[in-house]
Amino acid sequence: MSWVHRTSIKEIGPLPGFIRLSKRGAMTSGGVPLEGGYGWVVVSVLFLQYIIMAGIQGSVGIIHTELVSETSYSLSVIGWIGSLMIGLCTMSSPFISILTKFIPCRILAITGSLLMSLGFLCAAFTSSVPVLFLCLGILPGIGMNLISFSSIMILRGYFLKILPLAYGMCLAGVGVGMVSFPPFYVYLHVTFGLQGSFLIVSAICMNSVVFSGLTIPTRTQSQKKSMEKGLSLGDLFDFSLFKSYTFVMFVTGHLIFNIAYAVPFTYLPIKGEETGFSEQSSALFITVLGAGSSVGRILFGWMSGKFPLIRKKAFLVVMVLSTLSLLPVSFTSSYSLIMVCSTIFGACAGIIHTEIPSFLIGLIGIDNLPNGLSVAYLQQGIGSLVGIPIAEAVCRRVGDNAAFGFTTVVCALVLVLFTLSLYLPERKPQTPKVPHILPEVPKPEVFVVTMAETGPTAA
């Protein structure tokens, strides 16, 4: 008689990071099901956080006006507050990408929420403009980036196939915040004054601390975080990303698109007032732009998850629409047409921003997403900072209507770069070599023993 003993999986124990199919067929990692579960709670709280962050950014112009009237400084000086806030919200991404290798993303998000709240709290008790640069520009800017960058890292642990939809639902809060928060902030200022409005905004930001606490990473993400703490300096950033020409073209296109994206926020209201519309009516162009952004993010996120095979082509169609959407504004005085053009551009811009992480995963792999995303966000910040000055230089030579022609030309260049990066043969950079990210599981040993039959043969 012979017998064979094989060590079972139960005897080995759970396999950390082991990926398998669940009963529904969805991938699971570390025992946490993808495509939903607690991930929808994370989506919900991130949606609320983006409302707060986008609402504060959308109210920067109102804050500038208040500070100009309260201080002796001109708008050209006070305006640096908004530039610092919006610029640092993305330009600090490479530094934050490094922090995510050592500090849990949830802790980073909580820290970012505290920085936002602390900034507005301190701003309520000072009239020094240099201090206001710190309180209303630097602290909220870095805090917002800590929240937004960490949220994507956490979200990718819960979703795979429908990640674009989940991320789009989170970013829909951007449009909601842009539409709803500025009028609310005007009410706060009229009712409670400058100091009171800053204190209430600080209290609102404290709610984001609670939201950040609910963004719990998956078990696999936590295990990898604890093992990555032994990385050397050479492992902090993978510069081999830049060996991929498709990646370089894609992030360059993203940089150039953000130059164009910054223009309508300044020149649409100017166009409305020059055409003869009231200030309130002209401000509605920005309102519908934000509303279109929210709707576009959710609809395209759902579509790209539902029909992944046409996702690239649909994305390029959206890019074509964004290129052409604002061109009629240069030649029309119709209020309705300008509203339609603003809505279309807002929807297209929202879709493009939402899809950036998903396409980066396709170009460089999900393991390289933190580094790739930090580069993309850095360039987004640079584009946001230089977009208005470049457009102003063009308009000084040609006229204010040239701003929309400038946007069209820039978006056309972006369309070419995106098309090439998505359809040229991909050359993915190698995954950074990080030793022993997951503990090695010993292979089951197999013992084969043959025993001589010493007794009589059974009948």
Image (tube, helix red, strand yellow):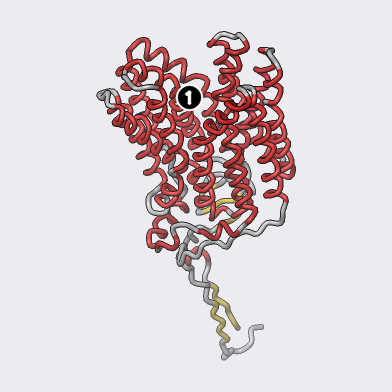
From the viewer's side, name the closer residue of 291 and 8: 291
Residue 22 appears in the rendering:
no
Pinpoint residue 31: horizontal percent, then vertical percent: 51, 52
Residue 150 drawn above or below residue 344: below
Residue for point 60% across, 17% down: 271
Indicate the quadrant where residue 135 lies.
top left
Residue depicted at 58% across the width and 86% down the height? 450
User: Which quadrant of the figure has residue 392?
Assistant: top right
Q: Nearer the viewer, residue 197 or 300?
A: 197
Tell me how many marks there are.
1
> In which quadrant will I find the C terminus?
bottom right
Identified at 71% across, 56% down, the residue is 425
Q: Where residue 279 sits: x, y (%)?
A: 53, 11
Q: Which residue is under mark 1?
A: 58
**In the figure, is residue 320 to the left or right of 258?**
right
Indicate the quadrant where residue 402 lies. top right
Is residue 268 among the parts visible in the rendering?
yes
Which quadrant: the N terminus?
bottom right
Q: Secondary structure at mark 1?
A: helix
